[in-house]
Amino acid sequence: MSIREIFKLGDATLIIVIFAIALIWSRCNRERNTEPESLRIVTANTDDTLSLFRDTLIAMEHLTIEIKNESAAITHSDCPTQQCVRTGSITTPGQMSACMPNGIWIEILGSEKTTDVISY
């Protein structure tokens, strides 16, 4: 049995068309503007937005948030599990980090959010 008997001309054409569509779609998605613009900090009493383009250290009552090199991280917390500190830096629009015991979360804002496999 030869390859010509298994694959017909239409099969090869269909494979090439699907590959071309996938290539064009991936290039278009890569060219979208997903640059981070600001950091949103939400607590029980406030909802603030800060620039990511200026290095800042925010000392709150229960935790510390550091903005550095267009990324943000909860660097210190008095919560028992320290999950928020272990999350590390967030860098792309749509990413979040939260300290649930203290009721504080941070989110990177941008012109367009990116969706990863886990959050989708």
Image: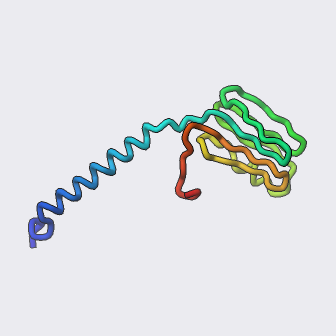
Q: How is the image coloured?
A: rainbow
**Image point (65%, 41%), residue name:** 108
Assign the N terminus to one quadrant of the image.
Answer: bottom left
Question: Residue 78 in the image: x percent, y percent?
Answer: 87, 49
Looking at the image, the residue that sits furthest to the top is 54
Query: What is the quadrant of residue 68 in the picture?
Result: top right
Q: Extreme right residue here?
A: 61
Measured as percent of width and height from the top left, residue 100 is found at 79, 55
Q: Is residue 7 above or below residue 26?
A: below
Give the side of residue 92 with respect to residue 42, left or right: left
The mark total stands at: 0
Answer left or right for 73 relative to 43.
Answer: left
Q: Quadrant of residue 101?
A: bottom right
Residue 113 as seen in the image, left or right of residue 63: left
Q: Residue at x 54, y 51 (%)?
A: 115
Residue closer to the observer: 111 or 75: 111
Q: Position of residue 56 (x, y in %)?
A: 76, 29
Image location of residue 76, percent across then percent down: 81, 43
Q: Residue at x 82, y 52 (%)?
A: 103
Give left or right: position of 15 versus 73.
left
Q: Residue furthest bottom?
A: 1
Examine the rendered structure and indicate whether residue 4 appears above or below residue 64.
Answer: below
* Residue at x 67% of width, y 48% of height: 96
The quadrant of the image that shows the C terminus is bottom right
